[in-house]
Amino acid sequence: MMAAAGNPLHTDIVDFKIPSGNNKTLFVSNILPRETEAEIYDCIFKVFSEFGLLYSVRVCRNAAAAEPGYYAIVKFYSALNARRAQSDTNKQCLFQRIPLKVQMCTKQRSMKVSGENQLPLNSIKCQELANYYLGFNGWCSRIIALQNISDGGGCEENTEELVQSERKNIKYICIMEVKFINYGMCSRGIGVSDEFDQDATDPLNFALKLGRAQKAATQKALSDAFQKILLVVLGNGKVSVQWSSEQNETDCFTEEELQTQLQVNDISWSQFEHEGQEEILSDLSFKTETIEGIGT
């Protein structure tokens, strides 16, 4: 469920990428060491999730040279939600007897996670975000194609040497379509996955690797389909779905044309393979006064 409505004149753009903007990240300090890290995590998550969907919460111990206690880094998908949370929680006691200090991140982002090259959300996070803003019945997905494109895949000549080679490098491509039911829009994504089978003599292991490659390809395709979509969120809670700049020719092909494209051997599928999505905690920095009592 979305947070309480704000000013309807305020709008926010939410995309299906890992939030990297400083205006979406809060630094929470002055947390007393009365609870365990897990208990503090639960308290922080409960308090801040009331303002909107959270991408992540991290709870860390203060530096050894500082006062005992903890600090937390809270990341929202929405900049509007982050600002509202900062304003309403700063200098409030909330779950402890002394006020918390809640500040916005001020700078800086890693070059690897710049605004021009944000990493995509994985498929689970994409579904979570879509369910939050559009509802569980607001979208659906289907697989258009799932094909083995391993070296030698699809060849009629099935020599023992070819089978051994194919088992060592299992590669699948998936084309997925996501339909946004209330908006009359469909977005298509492509995902490619590799699995390497070290033991080509074990048919059970090969079957497991095959299943993992198929699943990973479908997950990447779903994530890729969501990358082309932007959610325009008004302060009163209304949501609109718009195309991002990443829409490409895949969305223009008919299903028959897509099936034909899969047979082309000279297409490089590496452009559809996403790298790891782990953000780096050290890429975040804050004003000196916001880390008072934490140490350096």
Image (cartoon, grey):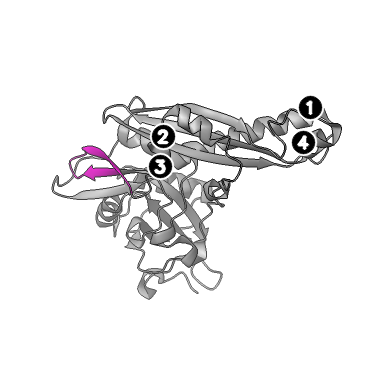
What residue is disc 3 on? 249
What residue is disc 4 on? 167
What residue is disc 1 on? 204
User: Marks 2 and 4, Cα distance to the nearest angstrom?
Assistant: 32 Å
Looking at the image, tell me whether mark 2 or mark 4 is earlier in sequence order. Answer: 4
Helix, strand or loop under label 1: helix
Three-letter amino acid code at disc 1?
Leu
What residue is disc 2 on? 253
How packed is label 1: few (under 14 Cα within 10 Å), some, or many (20 or more)?
A: few
Q: Are marks 1 and 4 in contact (CB under 8 Å)?
A: no
Q: Nearer the viewer, mark 2 or mark 4?
A: 2
Residue located 54% across and 54% down the image? 278
Looking at the image, tell me whether mark 3 or mark 1 is earlier in sequence order. Answer: 1
Q: Nearer the viewer, residue 61 or 56?
A: 56
Q: Nearer the viewer, mark 1 or mark 2?
A: 2
Helix, strand or loop under label 2: loop
User: Marks 1 and 2, Cα distance to the nearest angstrom?
Assistant: 37 Å
Three-letter amino acid code at disc 4?
Arg
Quadrant (top left, top right, bottom left, bottom right) of the N terminus:
top left
How packed is label 4: few (under 14 Cα within 10 Å), some, or many (20 or more)?
A: many
Three-letter amino acid code at disc 2?
Phe
Three-letter amino acid code at disc 3?
Glu
Helix, strand or loop under label 3: helix
Looking at the image, tell me whether mark 3 or mark 4 is earlier in sequence order. Answer: 4
User: Marks 1 and 4, Cα distance to the nearest angstrom?
Assistant: 12 Å
Residue located 41% across and 30% down the image? 254
Q: Nearer the viewer, mark 3 or mark 1?
A: 3
Region in magenta = 231-244
Q: Nearer the viewer, residue 243 or 47?
A: 243
